[in-house]
């Protein structure tokens, strides 16, 4: 069947009401809920972190997400974890 393009959308909230970040990653539809679940599974990696600390070394931030020993089997270099990490990093940049 034809693709049914979808997106997983991330909103990072901060302790400042006027500062948030929005990120997304696109899928071809079927399995989009897997990408959303991967984003939620990575939540513990960012909750409580300071934006300044993350921005100081975005490469280390990316590697921390893609090297999670409990999740990397899902695909650190491609697949759900890569898409989920991309959505979170996009939200940080925003």
Image: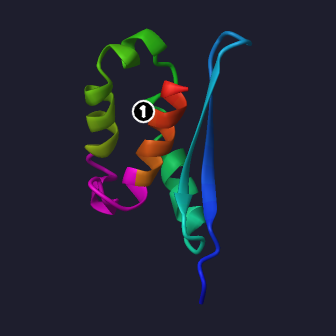
Q: How far from the left and from the top, in percent, is residue 44?
A: 47, 34
Q: Is residue 73 magenta?
A: yes
Q: Is residue 2 magenta?
A: no
In screen coordinates, is 1 left or right of 70?
right
Q: How far from the left and from the top, in percent, is residue 6?
A: 63, 63
Q: Residue furthest front?
A: 2
Where is residue 80, by image quadrant?
A: bottom left
Q: Residue furthest right?
A: 17
Res. 52 visible in picture? yes
Magenta residue span: 69-82
Res. 43 visible in picture? no
- Dot 1, how many residues are within 10 Å of its Cα: few (below 14), some (14-19), or many (20+)? few
Q: Residue at x 34, y 52 (%)?
A: 71
Q: How far from the left and from the top, in percent, is residue 45?
A: 42, 32
Give the residue number, with chain letter if any, for mark 1.
45
Q: Residue at x 27, y 29 (%)?
A: 59
In screen coordinates, is 48 left or right of 29?
left
Where is residue 64, by image quadrant?
A: top left
What colouring method underlies this structural image?
A: rainbow
Q: Residue at x 60, y 84 (%)?
A: 2
Q: Residue furthest bottom?
A: 1
- In the picture shown, does residue 46 fall above or below 28? above
Q: Residue at x 68, y 9 (%)?
A: 16
In screen coordinates, is 9 left or right of 86?
right
Q: How far from the left and from the top, in percent, is residue 67?
A: 25, 43
For the N terminus, the quadrant is: bottom right
For the C terminus, the quadrant is: top right
């Amino acid at each position: 069947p034809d693709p049914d393009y979808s997106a997983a959308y991330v909103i990072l909230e901060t302790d400042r009401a006027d500062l948030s970040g929005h990120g997304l990653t696109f899928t071809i539809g079927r399995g989009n809920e897997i990408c959303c679940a991967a984003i939620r599974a990575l939540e513990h990696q960012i909750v409580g972190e300071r934006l300044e600390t993350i921005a100081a070394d975005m490469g280390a931030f990316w590697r921390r997400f893609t090297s999670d020993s409990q999740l990397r089997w899902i695909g650190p270099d491609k697949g759900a974890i890569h898409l989920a990490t991309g959505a979170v990093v996009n939200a940080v940049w925003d």
